[in-house]
Image (cartoon, rainbow, N blue to C red):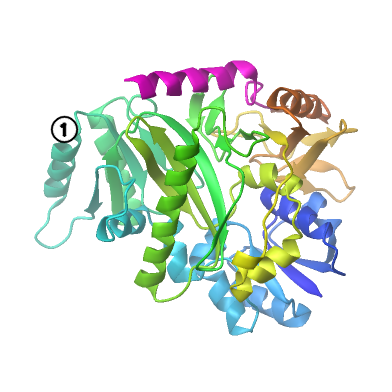
Amino acid sequence: MKVLVVGNGARENAIVEAFSRSKHNLEIVVFADKVNPGIKKFASAYEVASSLLDFEKLREFAAKEKPEFAVVGPEAPIVAGAADELEKLGIPCVAPKKLGGQLEGSKAFTRKLMQKYEIVGNPAFAVFKKWSGDISEADVMEAMRKFVEALNGEFVVKADGLQGGKGVKVVGDHLAGIADGLHYAKRCIEEDGYVVIEEKLIGEEFSLMYLTDGETLAAMPAVQDHKRAYEDDKGPNTGGMGTYSDSNHSLPFLTAEDLVQAREITQAMLEAVNEETGEKFRGVMYGGFMATKAGVRLIEYNARFGDPEAENVFPIMESDFVDVCRAVISGNLKNTPLEFAKKATVCKYVVPNGYPDAPIKGEEIKVFGLPENCKAYYASVDLDSEGRLRLGGSRAIALVGIADSLSKAERIAEEGVKSIEGPVFHRRDIGTEALINRRVIHMQNIRKQ
């Protein structure tokens, strides 16, 4: 049998490696826009297009290879309708169709859906539309000003469309104040036609990914991502500098009730999306949540596996991923266990110097022998004509340490980083005892208030 994987980042590297462990006699075919050496070694066919959105070339490749099913990795092709295109050829996907992809493709869609179906976990928010007709730019700017003032100036501005994890700006962190926030909101409206402004939530963020066949939710281990570029959570937002997950599949600052609430929100959202779109959402529902004093609140939903979160969960997946994908497609997920080893994982991304604002590109990097229990997943790297690795300008390689405890997994990941030579940097603090203790104490203090 054949499976098709769309995408060529570290997330897809982890997906392909999981498929390679299947008990089934499996061929993996890949549709990519770059050559990823970590993926290509597993692929029996590897098609490189100018863009992952070149659906004509995707259809041609899929028609030639005739895979049993496909897994679409990145958000852009999902939101643009890759699953719709493949299903026209009779190739089912572990990814939602275009209508379901709105869950990630539009922040406004998700917030309004939660509001319409009265789903708990929605922060105070407002959606503002681009000025037209009788509504002037001045009217919209004044309405936004009044809303943020009603939030006492504690607010978050979210670009409506896809921004690679960099479209959310928080007052006090990325925005100097109301004037700065309104300026960014205006820019978002001009680019997307909409902007979402929300209350600023106080708490600790966590990621929970669920596979679903449209009815059943199968949970993956909880993960905490680190968006800021520099240590101590400083600097600009990135696509994610690293992640960690504990051996009990929770996180040290979460309670059992937090996980229950997150699941209840996701179950309600699944039913709402199905009702709203008239078709079953099939694939990944990945919620970014905030544990707060008042309970769990939704930050956003994604319609695909997270990156780096996928790099934490796939290495410890004990279920056969082919069987799981077949269950997602056939609607039999309730009878197919999704199981993970009781291991802690710490992922640290090495990125080009200057990332994310002015990353260097084209410089050579070298990978030497990895320590035991360390995985290296390739992301934005290129192979030159002589087989040398070159930096592609974004996150380069994810190093994942796997162990019985977070402290051991962190040390393995840090040793793994040392196997990379070149003009790169990483966040040394991810997964460390000091950072995690700060998270725990922060959450304890919030719950006491």
As drawn, 333 above or below 389? below
Towards the viewer: 173 or 318: 318
Mark 1, secondary structure of its residue: helix
Q: For this view, does 442 lie left or right of residue 344?
A: left
Q: Split into 4 quadrants, where in the image is the N terminus?
A: bottom right
- Magenta range is 425-449
Q: Position of residue 407 (x, y in %)?
A: 71, 22
As drawn, 13 above or below 274? above
The residue under label 1 is which amino acid type?
Glu
- Circle 1 residue: 149
As drawn, 340 above or below 248? below
User: Magenta stretch mostly in which secondary structure?
Assistant: helix
Towards the viewer: 379 or 208: 208
Q: Position of residue 352 (x, y in %)?
A: 67, 33
Pointer 1: residues within 10 angstroms few (<14), some, or many (20+)?
Answer: few
Q: Position of residue 156 (x, y in %)?
A: 32, 37
Q: For this view, does 15 lie left or right of residue 131?
A: right
Instruction: Say which residue appears at 72% left-offset and 25% top-offset.
Output: 410
